[in-house]
Amino acid sequence: MTRINLTVDGAKVSDDVEPRTLLVHYLRETLGKTGTVVGCDTSNCGACTVHLDGKSVKSCNVLAVQADGADVTTIEGLAQDGELHPVQAAFHECHALQCGYCTPGMIMQSVDLLKDNPNPSEDEIRVGLEGNLCRCTGYHNIVRAVQTAAAGASEGGQA
Amino acid sequence: MIPAQFDYAAPTSVEEALALLAEHGDEAKVIAGGQSLLPVLRMRLNAPGIVVDLGRIEGLSGVRDDGDVLTVGAMTTHAEMLGNPLVAEHAALVTKAVHHLADAQIRHRGTFGGALAHADPAGDMGAPALALDAEFVIAGQSGVRTVPASDFFVDLFETAIGEDELLVGVRLPKHTGWGAHYEKFVRVAHQWPIVAVAATVKAEGGTITEARVGLTNMGSTPLRATAVEQALTGQPATEETVRAAAASAADGTAPPSDLNGDSDYRRHLATVLTRRAVLAAAGG
């Protein structure tokens, strides 16, 4: 077992983990952060996307021990004081989901995308989300949600 | 899927890492960003006794201007390469190719050195490194040695890096002012190429004075299309001459056949993608 100390959604946590433990399993099974889901388990689908030190990663493709000392934000840490994050609100408003399974990862990657590029074109959104798969084929509304969040931010919101 | 059990070490210096590799021999596996290794471990295609994590070693990432070359730390992430102005100016072929490597999340974790050391023939960094005549800086317990790209890629997933050695950096000779393009053919987004072509071209007054062309996934290692390079030299950068030169792109190659396409199809793709890549490189 290896001792890890990290910050997850603003809270400091410390645990002994097997080195083979994947970050997504640590988040879900040790910390109970089941908002982050396992989709494909092959690092293709992006459903497990979280932010590691402010950058989006696929948490099924990171060892928990590699995250020692890091700051992790999951989908559960986006809303502040009961208010949805603007990207979450935009996904809700645009109905950017069908079954909803890809949604946590889509939102986390969209937040990362908008941080780097606050006013992306439709093409830039589609390329920026290429590592996130939606098997309901609901991409159109997802793209609209990202556009809506970007427009809201440019009008003085906080995305 | 969960990897088999392994021990874990996170050395804080290259020396400490080398000592671990010497101690554990072929039981040890080095992890850089882990974006290729972790899927392998999860699928249990490999089960090392110990994983040696380079992530805690200071000084292994970043791009440095060393006069005629850029020295890239092995742990520099793909995202850092994509946004680096020195790379864009002096090794534009890498910038063009890394843009097409996997997806944003993978580029945040995956590293330039890790991808090259992994030596997947379908990896997107090998052909650009080969085309730019990169030099690989390899550290061992007896010191540091440099291996040219032409000797680095040995076979499928096999490089000149010894069992007790570490790739610590890659030197990219500057190709300032050269046009560059990476033409990647994929069936679905963010996947490995069925075939890709890395082309960088020096052109003066519409004439190609020098050309470098690397091929991805056309054999067990990245390859140079030397016949194309020679045929392009001194030629005008027109559709007609580039098409004629690109016709020899698959000469001497033995590409694999798999579910994505058979060998003949890849040989055909190589000629088409080479034409597109060279024309785009010469135009920009």
Image (tube, helix red, strand yellow):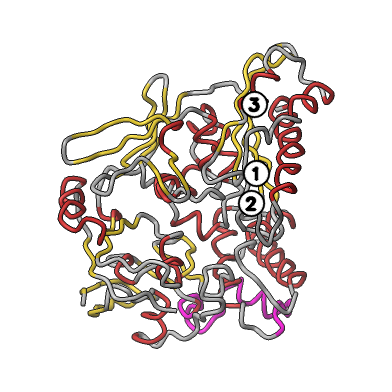
Q: Dot 2 falls on which chain?
A: B
Disc 1/disc 2 C-alpha distance (Å): 6 Å
Tag of residue B196:
1
Q: Dot 3 falls on which chain?
A: B
B133 or A37, nearer to the observer:
B133
Q: Is residue A10 visible?
A: no
Q: Secondary structure at mark 2?
A: loop
| Rendered location of residue B106, percent (x, y) | 50, 58
Q: Secondary structure at mark 1?
A: strand
Tag 3 near tag 1, CB within 8 Å: no
Marks 3 and 1 share the same chain: yes
Q: Residues within 10 Å of mark 3 (few under 14, many from 20)?
A: many
| Rendered location of residue A65, percent (x, y) | 29, 69
| Rendered location of residue B153, percent (x, y) | 44, 40
Does residue B50 sit above or below B123 in this rendering? below
| Amino acid type shown at disc 2 | Pro
User: Residue at (67%, 80%) from the top-left corner?
Assistant: A92
User: Where are the magenta residues, as a range?
Assistant: A76-98
Tag 2 residue = B193
Residue depth check, mark 3 versus mark 2: number of the one nearer the observer: 2
Q: Earlier in the sequence, mark 3 or mark 1?
A: 3
Tag of residue A121:
none
Tag 1 near tag 2, CB within 8 Å: yes
Q: Secondary structure at mark 3?
A: strand
Tag 3 residue = B179
Q: Residues within 10 Å of mark 2 (few under 14, many from 20)?
A: many
Disc 3/disc 2 C-alpha distance (Å): 22 Å
Residue furthest right in the image: B240
